[in-house]
Amino acid sequence: MPTDNRCGVLFDVDGTLVDTTYLHTVSWWEALCQAGHPVPMARIHRAIGMGSDKLLDHLLGPERDRSADGKLREEHDARYAGYWPRLVPLPRAVELLRACAARGLRVVLASSAAEHELAALRAALDADDVIDTATSSADARRSKPAPDILVAALEQSGLTAERVVFVGDSVWDVAAAGKLDIPCIGLTCGGTSRAELAGAGAAAVYDDPGALLDALGESAIAALR
């Protein structure tokens, strides 16, 4: 897509706009335990935000036998899907999307979720009328902390890295944005602390989408023109 002069906000979705981080944690914990890998939930939680390939390397070691990885992903996906009817947006997430759109900014969901998972997340948000573009895992060859999904979001929306801000909830989000010199606003609602997000390089940190909305006029988003 050709680029234009508009600005935009790229949003991670899982744990940033929709309250799913701990659902993913429990789903991975159950899948791993069933396969004989009793990994503590705290370790799993800290890996949420990585792609599943990197997550399994991080938790089980890169030298392991990968022949069971596909089964582990299927088990996680099956357990996580059971939560879809109960997915809810994080505080004032939809209001934040609408406020950004009202400022004339493109609203882009830079999600690494599989397409069927993304559909469930979008249904929970119920804000398709203000969402300009949305990516899924099919759009990126490498998962976060690689920046591929952000590159795809920029290409599909026609935006440039110099004219966007990224909003995410994990250190992996901050790392991915940093590789493209995109300012990243961190939200602690995914369970990662303010200190960790700031230490990873977040331009600013807020508690949740509602807190960012309240400070929107003073945030990095307000500087987008």
Image (cartoon, rainbow, N blue to C red):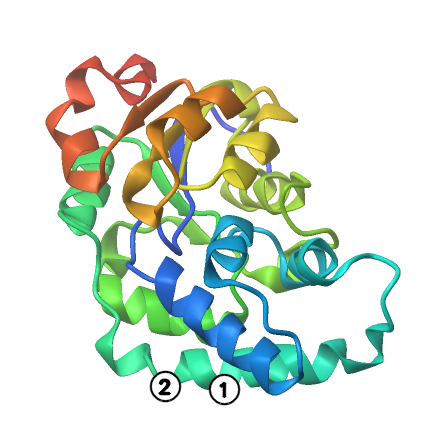
The answer to whether residue 165 is left or right of residue 135 is left
Horizontal side of 156 relative to 98 (left or right) equals: right
Image quadrant where one finds the N terminus? top right
Residue 117: give x, y in percent of width and height. Answer: 45, 72
Whether residue 153 sits left or right of residue 128 in the image: it is right
Give x and y (percent) for residue 93. 20, 48
* Crowd band around label 2 with a 10 angstrom C-alpha radius: few (<14), some (14–19), many (20+): few
| Between 162 and 112, the one nearer to me in the picture | 112
Q: Quadrant of the C terminus?
A: top left
Identify the element where label 1 is drawn.
helix
Instruction: Tell me how many marks there are.
Output: 2
Type of amino acid at the residue the image marks with label 1: Ala
Residue 25, can we see it? yes
User: Percent position (x, y) of residue 181?
Assistant: 59, 19
Q: Amino acid at mark 2?
A: Gly
Question: At which x and y percent is residue 46?
Answer: 50, 49
Frontmost residue, 110 versus 61: 61
Q: Which mark is residue 78?
A: 1
Residue at which label 2 appears = 82
Task: Please say if 220 is above or below 139.
Answer: above
Name which residue lies at 49% across and 27% down.
4
Residue drawn at (73%, 51%), measured in percent from left and top? 142
Residue at horizontal 13%, vertical 47%? 92
Question: Is disc 1 surrounded by few (<14), some (14 to 19) or many (20+) residues within 10 Å?
Answer: few
Q: CA distance from mark 2 to mark 1?
A: 7 Å
At mark 2, the secondary structure is loop
Report if the CB atoms under discs 2 and 1 are less than 8 Å apart. Answer: yes
177 w.r.t. 26: above or below: above
Q: Is residue 115 above or below residue 222?
A: below
Q: Is residue 59 above or below residue 220?
A: below
Q: Is residue 126 left or right of residue 8?
A: left
Q: Residue at x 42, y 71 (%)?
A: 26
